[in-house]
Image (cartoon, rainbow, N blue to C red):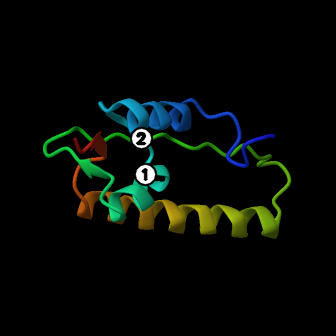
Amino acid sequence: MTDPRGANIGWLGLQHVLANGGSGYFAHRIVEPLLKARRLHLVAGAPKFSMPAYVVYSVDQPDDHVQSAIAIMRDLAAEQTRRVTETPARGARKRR
């Protein structure tokens, strides 16, 4: 059976930490439910990092749909940046 999340090394690493203990850096969207359930906790002082996203499109053929999509992505990125700067570090460690 295929995992609906796809092949994701971060997800596999998270499964290892959950099964065996330890710590690691994971995308907040992946660990958020586990943080809320108190199965993981954030490590104080852990550095934050982000993964850039890129969009490629032709500037020679302006399209209102493309411009609208770019505006939405910029708004989402700004919102995510606000959230990241308002929350603690993204490192997670399993409670023992």
Nearer to me, 58 or 37: 37
Residue 31: numbered disc: 1
Q: Which mark is residue 91?
A: none
Q: Position of residue 24 (x, y in %)?
A: 34, 33
Q: Horizontally, is 62 left or right of 73 in the view?
A: right
Q: Quadrant of residue 32?
A: bottom left
Residue under the point 86% across and 54% down: 61
Q: Is residue 1 above or below residue 59?
A: above
**Residue beneath disc 2:** 26
Depth check, front residue: 62 or 48: 48
Residue 72 appears in which quarter of the rendering?
A: bottom right
Pointer 2 or 1: first along the chain = 2
Give the x, y percent position of residue 40: 31, 50
Q: At 29% across and 42% down in the image, what residue appears?
A: 94
- Disc 1 residue crowd, few under 14, some 14–19, many 20+, Cα 10 Å: many
Q: Residue 77: where, in percent of width, then height?
A: 49, 59
Residue 67 picture location, percent across and down: 71, 65
Classify residue 30 as left or right of residue 58. Answer: left
Q: Quadrant of residue 79?
A: bottom left
Q: Residues within 10 Å of mark 2 (few under 14, many from 20)?
A: some
User: From what the image shows, is residue 60 above or below residue 17?
Assistant: below
Q: Amino acid at mark 2?
A: Phe
62 versus 27 height, above or below: below
Q: Please tell me which residue lies in front, 17 or 91.
A: 17
